[in-house]
Amino acid sequence: MDLMEKITSLAKRRGFIFQGSEIYGGYQGFWDYGPLGVELKNNVKKEWWKTMVYDRDDVVGVDAAIVMNPTVWEKSGHLKAFTDPLVECKVCHKRVRADNEEAVKDHEKTHEEENIWTEAKTFNLMTEVLLGTTEPKEKSYLRGEITQGVFVNFKNVVDSTRIKIPFGIGQIGKAFRNEITPGNLTFRSREFEQMELEYFVKPDEKASEKTFEEFKLVRIKWYKDLGMNPDKLHFHDHEPEKRAHYAKYATDIEYEAPFGWSEMEGIHHRGDYDLKNHGLTYRDEMTNEEFTPWVIETSGGVDRATLFFLIDAYEEDGERVVLKLSPKLAPYKIAVFPLLKNKPELVEKAKEIYQTLKKEFVVTWDERGNIGKRYFAQDEIGTPWCVTADFQTLDDNTVTVRDRDTAKQKRIAIDKLTEYFQNELR
Ligand code: GAP
């Protein structure tokens, strides 16, 4: 099995990621997160919000609607320019992205004929929705990027807060793209989540370039601080012809996935493109000067980050599979066990500890099989610490705390556990 197969199998077996609508044969480009996946993904979003919104004095958040007045998409340029090049196989009519070399080559292998592709056509990625009760129904779109919800609320945010330029608006939410070739698990989906900061600055070439460079560092540091292997991260500047229609210039943070270096987050200098198209300006209260701010954007994919954190954390250590996730991201922080499940006094003590820790942390309980099997099962889902109540616990109110990465144990007093884990998670 290659690494992607192992990750896919683990993700399903342990409840991280399931194929969407699986009992009906799935639905291409759609995925469901299971009990552990939702925790991991929520932790990714929580850490993003903490770094990009709560830890800063110059950023506020919004949560805009997914479906917007269709005029938004006309003004934003998405109806015209949000496209990918598409080619169709003349033999079987399969359509693939012309720039997806792997998909093109794979498909060519399925036919004996040569020159099977049509000329590349542009294919719009916006997903249409039909609304209202009268026919014909009104056509709108599921948002292709969460970003426009920030721009259309620019004035509302300025008017309702005391925030002044330079400032940012953060948002996390679902976006939809009718991708031609979804694939690589959740990497390219038709429904996915984005975590974005739109940072508004004065129109100034040099200063905005400095802000762009600063945000590049803020964002790559975020992945590293959460444990991603720095050797598997780099920036990839977009060549002018590959830039999105709104970008003055752009760079991607790429991760070296088993399927090659792949975009995880885009950092874009959007200039005045969006606010100008929406006819929005800003008035400096001190100078009374009115201008169209420029925008520096950091746009991360929640699902891609989640997938790459999973891949990056995966390690095999002999028989043992360990997900070395940062404790901040791990679905469960702690697992609590009684050493033996048929000793009521041990079970009772372990349950007490479990209930106490549950008030502060996301904790799981396990009493199946033997202790070795339980450690293995917790390692495989990335639980950083296992707490076991054993016979010594009944004498001196201490427990063993076993560390996932070193497999070493130490004894800690029960009344010191909460403080111990709080410090570890700081
Ligand atoms: N607002 C800017 C924007 O949407 P983008 O580069 O098109 O920029 C930003 O997308 C991020 O969204 C990407 O770096 C990626 O992480 C994520 N993303 C884009 N398309 C995706 C898809 N089909 N499936 C999963 N994630 C996707």
Image: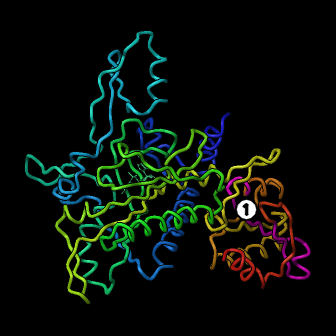
Identify the residue shown where x is 81% and y is 66%.
Answer: 402
Q: Residue 341 vs residue 152: left or right? A: right
Residue 318, quarter of picture:
top right
Q: Which colour scheme is used?
A: rainbow
* Residue beneath the point at 66% across and 59% down: 325
- Viewer-proximal residue, 279 or 334? 279
Q: How crowded is mark 1: few (under 14 residues within 10 Å), some or many (20 or more)?
A: some
Q: In which quarter of the image is the N terminus?
A: top right
Where residue 7 appears, as percent x and y from the top left, is 62, 44
* Three-letter residue code for mark 1: Asp
Q: Which residue is drawn at the image coordinates 54% and 49% (left, top)? A: 17
Determine whether, in the image, residue 28 is placed left or right of residue 408: left
Locate the C terminus by quadrant.
bottom right
Q: Position of residue 254 (x, y in %)?
A: 53, 50
Q: Is residue 330 magenta?
A: no
- Residue 109: x and y in percent read 49, 17
* Residue 419 in picture, x, y percent from top left: 72, 83
Residue annotated with mark 1: 366
Q: Is residue 362 above or below residue 94?
A: below
Residue 394 on the magenta segment:
yes
Q: Which residue is drawn at 90% across and 82% down?
A: 396
Q: In which quarter of the image is residue 44?
A: bottom right
Q: Please give the count of numbered marks on the rendered protein.
A: 1
Q: Residue furthest bottom?
A: 286
181 lies above or below 92: below
Which segment is the magenta one?
Answer: 379-402
Position of residue 154 relative to residue 216, above or below, is below
